[in-house]
Image: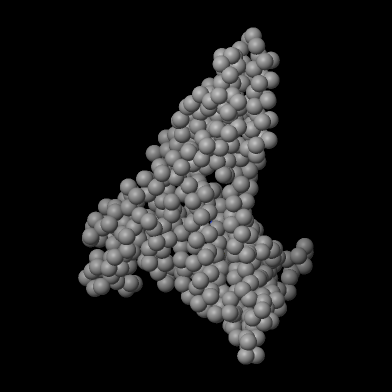
Amino acid sequence: MEEESGSLPSKSDFSAWYNDVLWRAEIMDVRYPVKGLYVWYPFGFGLRRQTYAILRNLLDGSEHEETLFPLLIPKTEFMKEAEHIKGFEDEVYWVTHGGLSELDIPLALRPTSETSIYPMFALWIRSHADLPLKVYQIVNTFRYETKHTRPLIRLREITSFKEAHTAHATWDEAAAQVEIALSLYTRFYDDLCIPITISRRPDWDKFPGADYTMAVDALMPDGRTLQVGTVHHLGDHFSKTFEITYEDAEGQQQYVHQTCYGISERCIAATIGVHGDDKGLVLPPKVAPVQVVVIPIIMKKRADEVLAAAEALKAELETSGLKVKIDTRDMRPGAKYYHWEMHGVPLRIEVGPRDLDAGTVVAATRDGEKMTVQRDEVVTAVPEILGAYAARLRTKAEEFLTSHITEAGSVEEAAEAVKTGIAVVHWCGDEACAEELEKVTNGSVLGTEVRSPHIKKSEGPCAVCGRQGTSTVIARTY
Ligand SMILES: Nc1ncnc2c1ncn2[C@@H]1O[C@H](COS(=O)(=O)NC(=O)[C@@H](N)CS)[C@@H](O)[C@H]1O
């Protein structure tokens, strides 16, 4: 794709920066003629592949099995669970025709897959020996979002919806699975070098049909939080609706207790938003489609020698398991640096005539570290350089988060804090007080039972009514 004229807006104008970097870094083409649907460029798709490979490995390594359920859900099944319907009825797309003939039963495009999966769970689960059952799928789902749609953040077609669904013998075992899911999500976001907060959503914000919802939030550069994952304890609401029972050791029929937990491409929006800078993407090594770019510094003389050395270096790095590109385009080095910095490539290695003579190369990390490396040590040095780079990304993102969390003693203080980040107040749990908190702060009550190394939980008088309250997170959200 041609390097367009003009330059990337400053990241301080986050909305403009975000929209611009998505096409300049070839992540998403937003010109598709349906609102809320976007096209993955190949480079962006590479970022998606790497990101979801991490997620797959974490799930597969935690006794989940990947599966695939149909996209279309018969209205008869979809309309079975009252809460679920209420939560999704104004978001569901319906297929009403097959060709020219009207369907006798309209089919929903899955907004999420409880009502396609659980009728099958009822067939699959017969005895406690079938439990625990842990499956996941990574599919596209469809939600007719009426709020402002944004690529990777608020889609009508969620193209990368990882949804896990588990079934257990007891409520407690399902609750234990909620904790396992949260620890998997914590590891996943750590691999993306993204610090998160976890909290229990207030009841009015929990997943339709759930007992409770634990949510994972990331702080974006504009001070708003992005819900980048959720884990729901479904109790036996769905198993009673879909008759998912098992025979227990005493020969009794028991309803299973379930969980489900989802992550969408918002994880990529967070990676782009949290780490990016004024020059473009800054990608963690584990998800970068190109981890190292080799730039031959080609002068008139010795061009062939430099090119051969650069190709040899590329081959060696690839053999060591890295994703490497060599940029031999006929353009000045600075234009090449600009291009690969825009694409967030973690490490650039320059090879020129002087380097050949000195037996060295110049390594430059995407966050600005530059060093000379002995040519014959490059293959062992690169993993260390990338490790140190990832640690710096993590530290920088943690510092941003911790410096944007305010323990607020009053509603007014919370209102000030949410202009640029997260406020922690004491809230009694009463909905009326939450409404007052949201009205005055212009933020949302994200939740209680806050889990974050950066937020200490405490008790104290509710910031609104003075009754006994607990630490509660408030922020402006996407
Ligand atoms: N319109 C959307 N665009 C992008 N991501 C979304 C959208 N709606 C939800 N998500 C993401 O998908 C995650 C899971 O969605 S959810 O509704 O909370 N939960 C479920 O659907 C459950 N079935 C767990 S899979 C959310 O935490 C949020 O991060």
Tell me the residue at 48%/38% (across/down): 389
Quarter of the view holding residue 137: bottom right
As rendered, which of 113 and 109 lies closer to the eye?
Answer: 113
- Residue 237 sits in which quadrant? bottom right
Answer with left or right where residue 49 lies relative to residue 469. right
Q: In this figure, what is the number of numbered marks?
A: 0
Does residue 210 appear in this view? no
* Image colouring: one colour
Give coordinates of residue 266: x percent, y percent.
Answer: 52, 52
Q: Name the residue located 27 percent from the left edge and 57 percent from the top edge.
A: 407
Residue 405, how many percent across, how many down?
32, 52
Question: Which residue lies at the image location 43% right of the left edge and 51% below the top edge?
Answer: 195
Residue 170 place in picture, x, y as percent = 54, 80
| Frontmost residue, 461 versus 146 | 461
Q: Relative to residue 307, is residue 11 depicted above or below?
A: below
Q: Nearer the viewer, residue 210 or 393?
A: 393
Residue 138 in sight from this viewpoint: yes
Tell me the residue at 64%/83% (across/down): 246
Q: Residue furthest right?
A: 100
Viewer-proximal residue among 234 and 438: 234
From the image, which quarter does the C terminus lie in?
Answer: bottom left
Image-based side of 47 in relation to 427, left or right: right
User: In what quadrant of the picture does the N terminus appear?
Assistant: top right
Residue 338 image offset from top left, x and y in percent = 53, 27
